[in-house]
Image (cartoon, coloured by chain):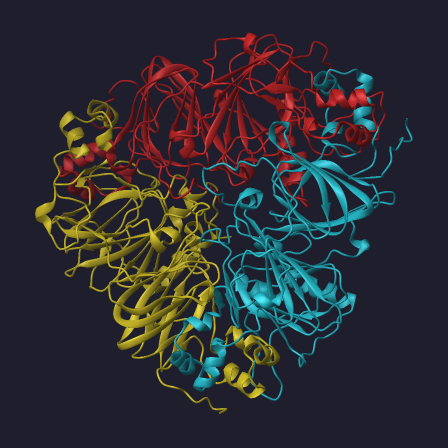
Chain colours: A yellow, B cyan, C red
Amino acid sequence: HPQRARSGDDQCRIQRLNAQEPNRRYESEAGTTEFWDRNDGEFGCAGLKAVRHVIQARGLLLPAYNSRGIQGTVLPGCAETYETRSQSSTGDREQRSTDRHQKVRRIQEGDILALPAGLSHWAYNDGELPLICVAIIDTGNEANQLDEKYRKFFLAGSSEQEGGRGGQEGQSQRGEQQEFKSVFNGFDQELLADIFNVDSETARKLQGQDDQRGRIVRADRFQVTIPEFDRQEEEEERQHGRGSPNPNGLEEITCTLKLRYNLGSPRRADVYNPRGGRTSSVNSDKLPVLSLLRLSAKRGVLYKNAILAPHWNINAHSAMYVTRGSGRVQVVGDSGRSVFDGEVREGQLLVIPQNYAVLKKAGNEGLEFVSFKTNDNAMSIPLAGRLSALRAMPEEVLANSYDISREEARNLKYNRDELRVFGPLRSKSSRE
Amino acid sequence: HPQRARSGDDQCRIQRLNAQEPNRRYESEAGTTEFWDRNDGEFGCAGLKAVRHVIQARGLLLPAYNSRGIQGTVLPGCAETYETRSQSSTGDREQRSTDRHQKVRRIQEGDILALPAGLSHWAYNDGELPLICVAIIDTGNEANQLDEKYRKFFLAGSSEQEGGRGGQEGQSQRGEQQEFKSVFNGFDQELLADIFNVDSETARKLQGQDDQRGRIVRADRFQVTIPEFDRQEEEEERQHGRGSPNPNGLEEITCTLKLRYNLGSPRRADVYNPRGGRTSSVNSDKLPVLSLLRLSAKRGVLYKNAILAPHWNINAHSAMYVTRGSGRVQVVGDSGRSVFDGEVREGQLLVIPQNYAVLKKAGNEGLEFVSFKTNDNAMSIPLAGRLSALRAMPEEVLANSYDISREEARNLKYNRDELRVFGPLRSKSSRE
Amino acid sequence: HPQRARSGDDQCRIQRLNAQEPNRRYESEAGTTEFWDRNDGEFGCAGLKAVRHVIQARGLLLPAYNSRGIQGTVLPGCAETYETRSQSSTGDREQRSTDRHQKVRRIQEGDILALPAGLSHWAYNDGELPLICVAIIDTGNEANQLDEKYRKFFLAGSSEQEGGRGGQEGQSQRGEQQEFKSVFNGFDQELLADIFNVDSETARKLQGQDDQRGRIVRADRFQVTIPEFDRQEEEEERQHGRGSPNPNGLEEITCTLKLRYNLGSPRRADVYNPRGGRTSSVNSDKLPVLSLLRLSAKRGVLYKNAILAPHWNINAHSAMYVTRGSGRVQVVGDSGRSVFDGEVREGQLLVIPQNYAVLKKAGNEGLEFVSFKTNDNAMSIPLAGRLSALRAMPEEVLANSYDISREEARNLKYNRDELRVFGPLRSKSSRE
């Protein structure tokens, strides 16, 4: 059962939605971090923040944990990364010759990663091209018990406060802003030496006080063995993960469950129209850990001038990130008010509140996007097409509601016979 | 597990409760819509709004969906309506000669309808008398992810903003207020024509721009066949609904589950006292869809001067709507403060916050009411009678707590032997 | 699935945490009640309030119910109390000669009591020493549907408002403050006489208008028989409670389920280090009713100069109450800011927000505490020791993250081989 807290009794006065670029940017030694973290407007109302990391080749995103659930997607760029768990490993007899650590995962373009709140994570790009990750942070999620501020807890490094800069200033401005430090920095150095049973110099390094490399650091030497799965093994792993007993809650879950799902493959399409494109989704049925995060995602690929049927999300907000191309989007709020009617293009994020009706039409280059939804089983109802709300109603209701003839009511119900993805031109259905 | 968000850290300063009439009224071609939608006072604190529709004979309540869960009850007036689902129908081969649509339900006096948030609905009165529906909108419900504003999304028609009028002005004032439009109105007309593959004129009608009929329109021609169930079939349908597999979540649930429960029949009483009256309730055990809505309802029928035992609701707010008669109600808040001591009468709504103690005594005409509760398994603890908190405690606790003798403690525990509905006069129990 | 609402969109600006004494004190005839009930700072952010009752020998804590979940712990003082349930008893044929009432429970030092929201409770101290109870009230819990005010509903007595007094003034100041009354006080006296079928004088006593004894009254005569369980029966009772069918929700649950768990016994330690001390926890696996309350607790006993490994709570706030001794505590917030670095001592309460990292070191007298957590299965991740986040990561990550050698990375991972409770002195592990 999905749930969320809301921002009090003061109402969300959404007059216009905006397709937004990130509002802040932060440069590191081996990459860039950009934020959508405004508290006002539709982002604040929906309780959503977003972050985009661009990790250069040989870049290591430092270990950190967040105060809330995150869902990331991997975007264009042939890249591979490694990922560790922050949970206890089993059977760690310390044979220093072989480094023991928790499972490390390979991720690839099109992957959705589910990162449960409070777990630490890191990522390394061992490919040749930059790795682009977009993460949605659901500050309205009930897993977050404090407030709607986006709190970051770093386990390493020291990074400056990201300022309100436009984003193009580059690395020269680093160090001018308020500092972000690792949590180790807040503990007493001598106590840390005691606790880790190491010398003061190592404790000082653990605190990372002089580190100027930022959030993403260059790691030229990085040898971690990752087993290569074939597809069948992956499937078996998934089955095992679902069926295993779960005596201790989240801790055990995350040691066995799958945290990754690839939405990129056309074979995973839920809806496919050769004239229009396809949509694929991942929800808690496909990736059970999403029931913990109460998030899901849908990927859409629309061909040139194709239309995604107008619909409304009945139980979730939606944050649409454009991964390629551009298109025209219209969003209608309560009382039939138009709140967005414009172009969206690659790299922009558009938040569509729950119950608002939305229509998407691809431009000449097509339109590809990922929509993150604040429900692990988000559902929408189309207003047109074979499964639409109008087709479900008796003709008498349509005729009387719209003050039209029976013939016109029939046309509204049956003239568009496709499912949610419509071909670009007027299609005369076979019955016309 | 029922849950709800609250309106922030600012406290609810409830000094007095009020038995309220609707604060706004809106006239349509074939009916009236009245609203209890104040944001302040106990309504705001409890996160509740309410709407009352009076649908004249041959009136059609236009299709719409709401931003939150709704529970409606059908009130006096021998009437019948039809209702459709907004979900996908199975097996819709389009044979235009026979209109295919989703299941349509007949409703009757005393019915409770559970309308899951975000699903569209409509209603038609094919009876001779007006149909009165009271709907409770739970703006504090976690199914509502945005804010506590009551947002209406119309699929047809155009209706003016309901003003702050007292309610008696009648139809003449329609059109003076801010307009409410259908969601189709917010989309581009040519795009709509494309999407539905219809001509511009039909698209314009779909937008309903010139429609002045309001929310409830007259539909003199309205032929929809509704199968007539007998009671046994209905029971079977219910059994089937509960046992069916549910692979896809809400979508499948609402295609098979029962959304209706009749609280009117005396045979369904949970508590019955021939000297005092009866209470009947519907919760998620009886109507499983209520677990999605996290609401339940109780109907009370008190005879002349009968008393409903003082009690408190341990896990829900209660919104009491008086359907017939009048009575005296007392409500006590924390610290023993009296927050209501007055008369309630037919057509009024009284919100009783969680944990507040309440006592109801019928007037000379008796008192009938429906209480809507913000928990799908609302529970209350009586302060007097056979299952009361006092009877559960040892006599020693009562004697010491109230500084009374053992004999007096025994009287408090045992002198009133009825359950929650007490006869009108002092009853000397058989043991006295 | 644990959940909680938060105090709106306004952020919690936690600059410093404070180890706090109660801020208000209220004297009764046979005991003292003290409150931590500030709405600002970390208490407000975490949605927590706390109460400490000191019940003198022969003192009776009057029946009352609260607007939210409560968890109490019994503290030093060899004492015994009785407790009743406010639920319906089965088979209550009224044989006045033998007083029938619901189950009464004996509690003892080290017990954790889980009191579901809205149920009334009372307690009697039949021991020789004062009984000290500390109760955490989770005002942020979703079981509380109204606001974050701590509302008390008394079933007996009348008690003055607790003022902002320092606490040492004693009984002489009672009566000067705003009055707290029983809920019966808010009802009409004649109606009460009718309802309970008693005379006016008893109804007046029920209202407790002249009662000046306060919240805890002396009860010299108090004969209630409590069966003495041996450990095996207790275990059987628990098994029975878990396995029983639950047709009616909370009402049945609380009639059969265990509400008590003893955290005092060293045999129940989850982590034990003979050089450092132990921790014991109770969660919904051990005490199923906690899943209703969404709270859990951990007890820690640290020997002289021992250290509890630095860690963060991934899914809960923590309220640490010091039951004996003193120690040094450091807490680090987001961005590595130190928000607490100081001494805590017996009787103080320290709130540690979700995700904040904390380190505890016992003083020369040792340190004992109970941490209440706002999740029925609270989990934490240690930063050092055998199950730490650092040990779970590959050496390559540590070496690159902290800019240290492989040898230093190995030292960080392996030099402290103990679990969460560390011995007081630098331990050179066997591998060094």
Q: Position of residue A345 (x, y in %)?
A: 25, 68
Question: Measuring 46% from the left and 80% from the top, which residue is drawn there?
Answer: B204
The C terminus of chain B: image quadrant: top right
In this rendered view, identify the residue nearer to me: C31 or B26: B26
In this rendered view, identify the residue nearer to me: B294 or A40: A40
Visible residue check, residue A101: no
In this rendered view, identify the residue nearer to me: C420 or B29: B29
Q: Quadrant of residue B358 in the image?
A: top right
Residue projecting furthest to the left: A172
Q: Quadrant of residue C29 in the image?
A: top right
Q: Say whether residue C182 is left or right of residue A167.
A: right
Visible residue check, residue B177: yes
Instruction: Decide: is B79 above or below C198.
Output: below
Instruction: Decide: is C86 above or below C303.
Output: below
Q: Position of residue B324 (x, y in %)?
A: 76, 52
Q: Say whether residue B298 is left or right of residue A376.
A: right
Q: Position of residue C126 (x, y in %)?
A: 65, 12
Question: Measuring 91% from the left and 31% from the top, which residue is drawn there?
Answer: B430
In this rendered view, identify the residue nearer to me: A15 or C393: A15
